[in-house]
Amino acid sequence: MPHSLPVIAIVGRPNVGKSTLFNRLIGHRSAIVHNTPGVTRDRHYDITDRYGYSVMIVDTGGFEPHPEDQLFRNVRAQALAAVREADVVLFVVDSRAGLNPLDEEVGRVLRTVHSKVLLVINKVEGNQQRLEAAEFYALGFETLHLVSAEHDHGITDLMDEVYLLLGPGPVEEDDEDDDSGAIPEDDEE
Ligand SMILES: Nc1nc2c(ncn2[C@@H]2O[C@H](COP(=O)(O)OP(=O)(O)O)[C@@H](O)[C@H]2O)c(=O)[nH]1
Ligand SMILES: [Mg+2]
């Protein structure tokens, strides 16, 4: 993958909708979506481009939580590997499943190793989920980003937040500079 692009990693326990969000962000279905946890076998990388600013999105669902007692460790390892190369981390949880001990573990790890983590509450499609999402404040993040990856709700606001965290993108020629001491032009012709 090209290393010059900023990297956005999608992290979370199985089945919260990471691959669905990945597909939504890149605009076509390339990650495998399945209702069986662990079905996505590999990491998936692809580029999305909003506001003329390309970023790499990484779907980190590439681990196999088969033995029950390994699930915890695998989620932790996955989260760590993903954040190492990421500029911004999208930490996805499932509003329908509610707060899960694995979410708490992933959240704890992420917040200690990365300063740019956005908490994404997925599968929010109605007022009930909107209200119940408040329980995720327990994860200790300031802001809850409520989305429905499947129905494309909240995605633009989420990506606006991502781009804010990334800071200025590639600077277009002749904008931005030379305005110190410049006299504003008269608007009226
Ligand atoms: N209702 C609803 N279901 C979703 C949403 N996003 C994903 N799902 C479903 O949740 C299940 C797991 O999704 P997937 O993207 O494979 O999760 P992953 O294991 O985290 O990659 C699938 O059945 C998806 O259709 C959403 O926004 N709303
Ligand atoms: Mg997946």
Image (cartoon, rainbow, N blue to C red):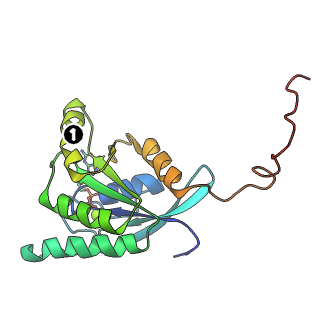
Camera-side residue: 28 or 121?
A: 121
Give whichever of 153, 133 is nearer the camera: 133
Q: Which residue is located at x 87 percent, y 33 percent? A: 185
Residue 124 figure quarter: top left
Ligand 2 is in which quadrant of the figure? bottom left
Residue 137 place in picture, x, y as percent: 23, 45
Q: Tell me the residue at 21%/33% (across/down).
A: 131
Q: In the rendered image, which quarter contains the C terminus?
A: top right
Q: Is residue 140 left or right of residue 160?
A: left
Crowding near the residue tagged with mark 1, few <14, some 14–19, many ≥20 C-alpha atoms within 10 Å: some
Closest to the observer: 104 or 69?
104
Inspect this view and state whether residue 108 appears: yes
Asked whether, in this view, residue 21 is left or right of residue 15, the answer is right
Tell me the kind of residue under disc 1: Ala
- Does residue 6 appear to the left or right of 173 in the view shown? left
Residue 31, percent from left and from top: 36, 64
In the image, 7: left or right of 37?
A: right
The residue beneath circle 1 is: 134
- Secondary structure at badge 1 equals helix
Q: Residue furthest top?
A: 188
Identify the residue shown where x is 42% and y is 46%: 158
Tell me which residue sits at (32%, 52%) in the image: 119
Residue 56 appears at what percent x and percent y? 50, 65
Q: Is residue 60 visible?
A: no
Q: Quadrant of residue 108?
A: bottom left
